[in-house]
Image (cartoon, rainbow, N blue to C red):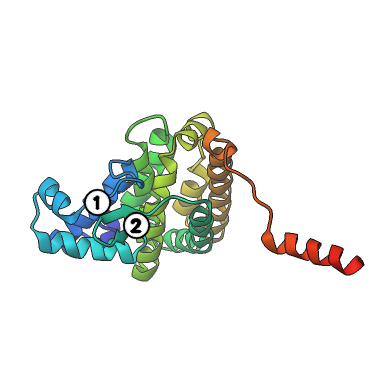
């Protein structure tokens, strides 16, 4: 069975290399971060994770090192770890990376789809029948849909980078306002699925670019419209203020 015939689920390690205990720990910690079981404002310790995961200290420590390098968590001297906060800057950066990579991944998938008809049917199955953000299974199915496209392209480095990007974006899809926006106005995955299944690599790239752009707009607007964002103070640029002050002083 090829990698394209068996794409991993959202709770599996993105670069699953043999199912080691370290990767098991990475996958579970990622899952807890994505679902909010590990909130960003509460510190946690490696010892607590060892007990909860039923794993020894070594693989958990290794997993935490990897996740810190990937930007999922930060270590706190003498107080354990904190989940990295979600920010608009990170959201923008993740979508920028996705907009650069996913059109290429879709183009490659379209070029290889004739060799993997089962995967093409799986893409259509999600896009035509299971693309319902209001269902509990949607987030995992949504990740599998996009990950399947990347794996179909048969480019391991592209898969490694884009899979990590998709996993991080899942956190933003679980925000209440984003979840409600997706349920009210679901993103249509059919144009992307249809283009790949036709083997039209140019149309697939265009469909992926449009899809990512629409997703970024929906997610960003949903976050900015939330009550918590409405109460964030707006501060003017200190540089701009300094320039105005200097200009006034020069007129005297």
- Image quarter for residue 237? bottom right
* Badge 1 or badge 2: first in the primary sequence: 1
Q: Secondary structure at mark 1?
A: helix
Report if residue 207 is visible in the image: yes
**Labels 1 and 2 touching (C-beta < 8 A):** yes
Farthest-out residue, front: 252
> In the image, residue 44 lies at what x, y percent?
24, 50
Q: Secondary structure at mark 2?
A: loop
> In the image, residue 126 lies at what x, y percent?
39, 40
Depth order, front residue of 85/195: 85
Question: Would you say 3 lies left or right of 120 here?
Answer: left
Report if residue 20 is visible in the image: no
- Image quarter for residue 111? bottom left
> In the image, residue 113 lies at what x, y percent?
39, 57
Q: Which residue is mark 2?
A: 72
Q: Which residue is mark 1?
A: 29
Q: Quadrant of the C terminus?
A: bottom right
- Tell me: residue 219, above or below residue 23: above
């Amino acid at each position: 069975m090829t990698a394209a015939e068996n794409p991993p689920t959202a709770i599996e390690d993105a670069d699953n290399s043999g199912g080691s205990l370290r990767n098991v720990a990475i996958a579970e910690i990622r899952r807890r971060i994505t679902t909010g079981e590990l909130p960003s404002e509460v510190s946690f310790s490696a010892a607590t994770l060892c007990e909860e995961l039923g794993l020894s200290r070594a693989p958990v420590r290794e997993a935490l090192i990897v996740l810190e390098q990937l930007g999922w968590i930060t270590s706190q001297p003498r107080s354990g770890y904190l989940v990295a906060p979600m920010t608009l800057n990170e959201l923008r950066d993740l979508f920028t990376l996705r907009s650069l990579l996913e059109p290429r991944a879709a183009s490659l998938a379209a070029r290889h789809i004739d060799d993997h008809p089962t995967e093409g049917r799986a893409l259509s199955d999600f896009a035509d029948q299971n693309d319902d953000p209001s269902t509990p299974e949607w987030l995992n199915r949504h990740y599998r849909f996009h990950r399947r496209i990347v794996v179909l392209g048969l480019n391991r480095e592209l898969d490694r980078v884009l899979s990590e990007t998709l996993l991080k974006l899942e956190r933003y899809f679980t925000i209440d306002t984003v979840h409600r926006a997706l349920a009210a106005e679901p993103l249509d995955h059919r144009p992307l699925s249809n283009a790949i299944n036709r083997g039209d690599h140019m149309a697939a790239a265009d469909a992926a670019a449009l899809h990512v752009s629409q997703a970024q707009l929906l997610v960003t607007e949903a976050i900015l419209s939330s009550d918590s964002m409405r109460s964030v103070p707006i501060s003017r640029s200190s540089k701009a203020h300094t320039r105005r002050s200097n200009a006034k002083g020069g007129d005297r």
